[in-house]
Image (tube, rainbow, N blue to C red):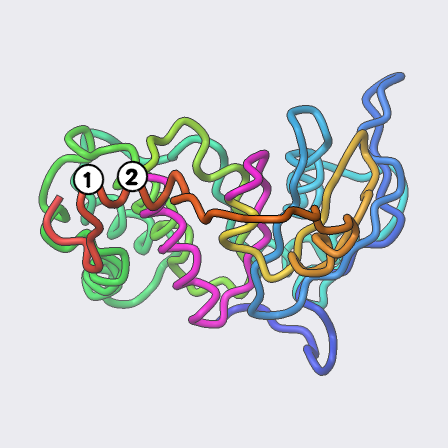
Amino acid sequence: MNATADPAGQPAIRVQGLEKSFKQLKVLRGVDLDVARGSIFALLGSNGAGKTTMVTILSTLLKADAGTALVNGFDIAAQAPQVRESISLTGQFAAVDEILTGRENLVMVARLRHLKDPGAIADDLLRRFSLTEAGGRRVATYSGGMRRRLDIAMSLIGDPPVIFLDEPTTGLDPEARLEVWQAVKELAAGGTTVLLTTQYLDEAEQLADRIAILHEGRILVNGTLAELKALLPPAKVEYVEKQPTLEDVFLTLVGARTDRGPQ
């Protein structure tokens, strides 16, 4: 069973005045944000904005210089063990064993967590992430999108209520990115709180319930996509011809699949 604090009316993540410097370099300069339970929150920013530092601090892997943060109701400084029981962290590169099969990777993690019936847990996650047919193959044969989906599946073993995804689609091709996006949407639909860091505007637009733009260690704006768009006046034009989006073109050419079959 996961560690659980009293969640009544409280956000899954609450950050107040978080600061972090590395020698003379100020990486975080007083960050405040709340992440609602069961939502997808995107922390959007360029390289060097402080996104990974933020996630590393919230994961208790790095100490903040100032400020406070609660994750699943637990203080990251005073209750680090309970925070770790409440979260899972998926970094920028898939942490999977290429020698093992997909199923063996999942079974291994379930055994390391001392969970009952690791085989059933593995089979359920393979099904949830559309990897059942590939489960018996070595991960070395997987595509980039399949590896990332397996990586996310591994991070869900033990049913953590909060998951951190640090730039999960870095280096993936367009089709693999769409596969990962679908997996993330399914996580939130199942009640998992997702804090996603990304430098891709379209990723935040497609996935997030709320978006915060982090720039030079500060939150510039924080709101829904509609709220952020309302910050700029709409362009006035006499005539608008709707052009297909790049996603429309891509899916038309490669053949949109409503159901990911055997890979």
Q: Residue furthest bottom?
A: 8
Residue 146: percent from the left, percent from the top?
Answer: 26, 41
Q: CA distance from mark 2 to mark 1?
A: 6 Å
User: In the figure, is residue 98 to the left or right of 39?
Assistant: left
Quadrant in the picture for residue 101? top left
Q: Residues within 10 Å of mark 2 (few under 14, many from 20)?
A: few
What is the secondary structure assignment of the residue under circle 1?
A: helix
Residue 29: percent from the left, percent from the top?
Answer: 88, 36
Instruction: Name the foreground residue: 204 vs 10.
Output: 204
Instruction: Name the foreground residue: 123 vs 227.
Output: 227
Query: Is residue 193 among what the camera can see?
Result: yes
What is the secondary structure assignment of the residue under circle 2?
A: helix
Read off the residue under disc 1: 254
Read off the residue under disc 2: 250
Is residue 228 found inside the magenta-colored segment of the image?
no
Q: Are marks 2 and 1 in contact (CB under 8 Å)?
A: yes
User: In the figure, is residue 92 to the left or right of 222?
Assistant: left
Q: Which residues are magenta?
A: 175-202
Instruction: Name the foreground residue: 103 vs 184.
Output: 184
User: In the figure, is residue 101 to the left or right of 2?
Assistant: left
Q: Amino acid at mark 2?
A: Phe
Q: Residues within 10 Å of mark 1 (few under 14, many from 20)?
A: few
Q: Amino acid at mark 1?
A: Val
